[in-house]
Amino acid sequence: MTLTQKIRNIALIGSLGLGGILSAHNAASADYAGKATAQSRIIDIQPADNSNERTQSDWISFFNKQGKAMIDASEVYKVGKTVKLVESLRADLKNARLVTSTRIIYDYDTYYNSPYAKIVHNYGSTVVKPTETNVVVPVYEENKLSKVLGTPEGLAYLRVLFDTNDDAENIAKTLQRLSGNCAYDPFISTLPNFARIIFHKAPVGFECNERGFNVSGDMFDDNTGHSRGVSIMTDKVK
């Protein structure tokens, strides 16, 4: 299934009586048993665990015990294309950081700052198979989205982070819609070079604070926030 088809398959499941549920249908080449499957990922309409805040690692353990996936950065991005669920997610962002299952693992060397990194969705999940992609991740210290999208490496980074082939204009529109009134021009953050050598990795989160709307790839392991579960509906492909 192409990425365009995936996006088209995103729908609000009103018939289930769960007004804000997002269903993203993804074709999986194989599940853990090695059988061909088709998967539907259904994002919870409420923040997990009564809006309590946890670190990414703690949320991963929480959702693994529940038998659920954890929302990843690409799913947060796709929520920006919906009607109802986006309002619910905006409310989360006003109260605390939204922590995802996406993690950036930075390539590093003691004496050399590499621009390369690995972006992993569903990091640490025992419910769904994590996916990873290597990409150049420039240093962004709250850089405006418009400037990031104005460079080839910035556009490539956000396309991998959000698992999309959208052009710069559509990425900007989607993030602005997701941010609501938080910011006209959201900003992007990644770990600075010295931190990549020390910490090597960073959970990915979204937040709306006094400075604006931030897509954060520079979180530390002890940073906390809300999160959401994702139910996995799996059927064998005939």
Image (cartoon, rainbow, N blue to C red):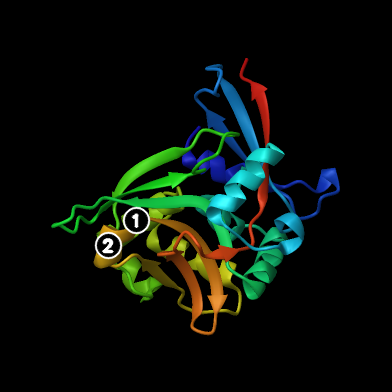
Judging depth in this view, the residue of 67 and 146 nearest the camera is 67
- Identify which residue is drawn at 39% across, 68% down: 189
Q: Is residue 29 above or below residue 123?
A: above
Q: Is residue 56 visible?
A: yes
- Around disc 2, counting alpha carbons within 10 Å, would you say few (fewer than 14), some (14 to 19), or many (20 or more)? some
Q: Where residue 8 appears, x then y in whole percent?
A: 59, 44
* Residue 187 as seen in the image, left or right of residue 106: right
Identify the element where label 1 is drawn.
helix
Judging depth in this view, the residue of 225 and 142 nearest the camera is 225
Q: Which residue is mark 2?
A: 138
Amino acid type indicated by mark 2: Pro
**Between discs 2 and 1, the one toward the N terminus:** 2
* Residue 197 as seen in the image, left or right of residue 10: left
Q: Which residue is mark 1?
A: 157
Q: Where residue 74 appears, x then y in whole percent?
A: 51, 51
Q: Is residue 108 above or below residue 190?
A: above
Amino acid type indicated by mark 1: Tyr
Residue positioned most to the right:
17
Q: Is residue 82 above or below residue 127?
A: below
Q: Where residue 212 appears, x then y in whole percent?
A: 51, 80
Judging depth in this view, the residue of 217 and 78 nearest the camera is 217
